[in-house]
């Protein structure tokens, strides 16, 4: 499964490098890391989607891709090659079941 390669605190600090107001406001709702430092797969999908589109901001997209590479044990490039963007858009929704999203990510990333 996808894991943080930095501390939870470092990852949260790195997210602030994305200089986009909507991104920063969405961190509170979409960035979920449990007490043991395990990242919610829906949060991975959320950051990936920002890396894909940047909400029409190329700078935000580039910053999100850089953060993705800096904090996860899977590169943005590899994730992008294996995970369909449309699937990730649906999976990032918090009403989706965390375990189902993570199981599918495990399957896709092998």
Image (tube, rainbow, N blue to C red):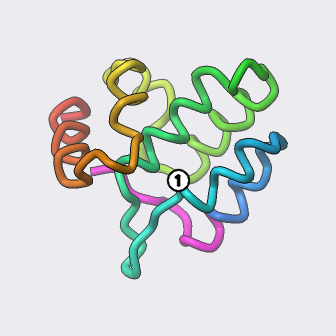
- In this rendering, the answer to whether 48 lies above or below 22 is above
Name the residue: 42% across, 20% down.
85
Location of residue 87 in the rendering, given as x and y in whole percent from the top left corner: 32, 24
Residue nearest the observer in this picture, 107 or 32: 32
Location of residue 9 in the rendering, given as x and y in whole percent from the top left corner: 62, 73
Q: Does residue 3 belong to the magenta stretch?
A: yes
Name the residue: 78% across, 22% down.
57
Q: Secondary structure at mark 1?
A: helix
Location of residue 5 in the rendering, given as x and y in whole percent from the top left corner: 49, 60
Name the residue: 28% across, 45% down.
96
Location of residue 31 in the rendering, given as x and y in whole percent from the top left corner: 53, 58
Q: Is residue 34 left or right of residue 62?
A: left
Residue nearest the observer in this picture, 92 or 80: 92
User: What secondary structure is the magenta-colored segment mainly?
Assistant: loop
**Number of numbered discs overlaid on the protein picture:** 1
Residue nearest the observer in this picture, 92 or 14: 92
Residue that badge 1 annotates = 30
- Neighbour tally class for label 1: few under 14, some 14-19, many 20 plus, Cα within 10 Å: some
Q: Is residue 43 left or right of residue 54?
A: left
- In this rendering, the answer to whether 53 lies above or below 41 is above
Residue 39 quadrant: bottom left
Residue nearest the observer in this picture, 95 or 34: 95
Q: Is residue 102 left or right of residue 35?
A: left
Name the residue: 79% across, 49% down.
17
- In this rendering, the answer to whether 43 lies above or below 60 is below
Residue 12 quadrant: bottom right
* Magenta highlight range: 1-11
**Quadrant that contains the C terminus:** top left
Q: Is residue 42 left or right of residue 13?
A: left
Residue 8 quadrant: bottom right
Q: Does residue 4 belong to the magenta stretch?
A: yes
């Amino acid at each position: 499964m996808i894991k943080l390669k930095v501390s939870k605190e470092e990852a949260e600090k790195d997210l602030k490098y994305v200089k986009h107001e909507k991104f920063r406001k969405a961190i509170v709702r979409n960035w979920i890391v449990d007490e043991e430092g395990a990242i919610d797969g829906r949060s991975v999908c959320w950051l990936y989607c920002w890396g894909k589109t940047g909400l029409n901001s190329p700078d935000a997209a580039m910053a999100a891709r850089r953060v993705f590479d800096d904090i996860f044990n899977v590169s943005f490039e590899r994730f992008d090659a294996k995970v369909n963007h449309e699937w990730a858009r649906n999976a990032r929704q918090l009403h989706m079941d965390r375990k189902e999203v993570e199981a599918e990510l495990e399957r896709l990333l092998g």
